[in-house]
Image (cartoon, rainbow, N blue to C red):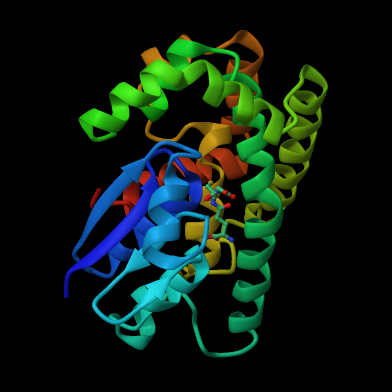
């Protein structure tokens, strides 16, 4: 099978899909693009606009949750991200969908509030993984891209503060869940709920970013990252990522 994963490199929904595919041992070639430029590629390959998009010999999968289900098909039942036994199956399904609907958009908007203001940060994050021609294009038109993204995500200091509050509440709720010492959000087993929470929290706790990149962030972004990382859920996410995200 020759699978292609069309992505925006730093997108947290793309990391969710990548992690699930890696975990299931499914080989794929990633095709990273810049935000907005990616439309050319997703429309051509799948007729839709969002990434991640997985294109295999006989399937076009255009949603990260569907990619997790696709990855699960390669795994033994007890290793699957979506357990089938109730009530666990429902609990995982509800949490996973909630993180997709709440955590993903909120963490992304927080990050865009800062990334769109900072040329260097924008190029470091988005241009590094691009093919040379697209990198040159993005470097030329970065100001326009940043302005379009700032408008699309309605960025402002007020929005950043509101996203921080929402993230604190969600991390607080997940910290309470973990208070009884359970290994994962729904109990002793790693599921789609854990993988989705951790992946979609990435823009808020900057998993995998070296300390020097975090040190360069605007002060209030840095403070938000620090505050969330220090919660029980934040520490747990960093720890589980280090343990479970073995392939990259
Ligand atoms: N429900 C989708 C959401 C994915 C999503 O929001 N992707 C963003 C990147 S983080 C995107 O492609 N946005 C571009 C657009 O909406 O045009 C999924 O889980 O795959």
Q: How many marks?
A: 0
Identify the residue at horizontal 49%, vertical 78% (top origin).
82
Identify the residue at horizontal 54%, vertical 12% (top origin).
118
Q: Quadrant of residue 96?
A: bottom right
Identify the residue at horizontal 55%, vertical 64% (top origin).
193
Front residue of 205 and 185: 205
Residue 147 seen from this side: yes
Front residue of 171 and 149: 149
Left or right of 82 in this view: 246: left
Identify the residue at horizontal 66%, vertical 26% (top origin).
150
Query: Would you place residue 175 above or below residue 48 in this image?
Result: above
Q: Residue 135 in the image: x percent, y percent?
A: 30, 26
Left or right of 85 in this view: 245: left
Q: Residue 173 in the image: x percent, y percent?
A: 74, 50
Q: Residue 199 in the image: x percent, y percent?
A: 48, 49
Q: Name the outermost residue toward the bottom.
A: 85
Residue 22 seen from this side: no
Left or right of 88 in this view: 60: left
Q: Residue 28 in the image: x percent, y percent?
A: 22, 61
Query: Would you place residue 136 above or below residue 43 in this image?
Result: above
> On the rendered image, what quadrant is the N terminus found in?
bottom left
Query: Would you place residue 112 above or below residue 91 in this image?
Result: above
Front residue of 193 and 179: 193
């Amino acid at each position: 099978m020759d699978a292609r994963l069309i992505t925006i490199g730093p997108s947290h929904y793309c990391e969710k899909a990548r992690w699930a595919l890696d975990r299931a041992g499914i080989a794929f070639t990633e095709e990273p693009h810049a935000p907005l430029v990616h439309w050319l590629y997703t429309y051509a390959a799948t007729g839709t606009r969002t990434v991640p998009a997985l294109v295999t010999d006989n399937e076009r999968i255009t949603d990260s949750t569907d990619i997790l289900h696709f990855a699960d098909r390669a795994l033994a039942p007890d290793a699957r991200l979506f357990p089938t036994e109730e009530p666990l199956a429902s609990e995982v399904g509800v949490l996973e969908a909630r993180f997709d609907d709440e955590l993903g958009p909120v963490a992304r908007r927080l990050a865009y509030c800062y990334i769109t203001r900072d040329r260097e940060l924008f190029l470091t994050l988005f241009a590094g993984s691009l093919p040379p021609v697209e990198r040159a294009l993005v470097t030329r038109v970065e100001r326009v891209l940043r302005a379009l993204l700032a408008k699309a995500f309605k960025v402002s200091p007020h929005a950043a503060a509101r996203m921080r509050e929402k993230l604190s509440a969600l991390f607080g709720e997940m910290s309470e869940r973990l208070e009884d010492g359970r290994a994962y959000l729904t109990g002793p087993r790693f599921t789609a709920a854990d993988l989705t929470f951790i992946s979609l929290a990435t823009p808020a706790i900057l998993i995998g970013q070296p300390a020097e990149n975090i040190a360069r962030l605007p002060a209030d972004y840095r403070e938000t990252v620090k505050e969330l990382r220090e919660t029980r859920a934040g520490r747990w996410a960093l720890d589980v990522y280090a343990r479970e995200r073995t392939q990259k």
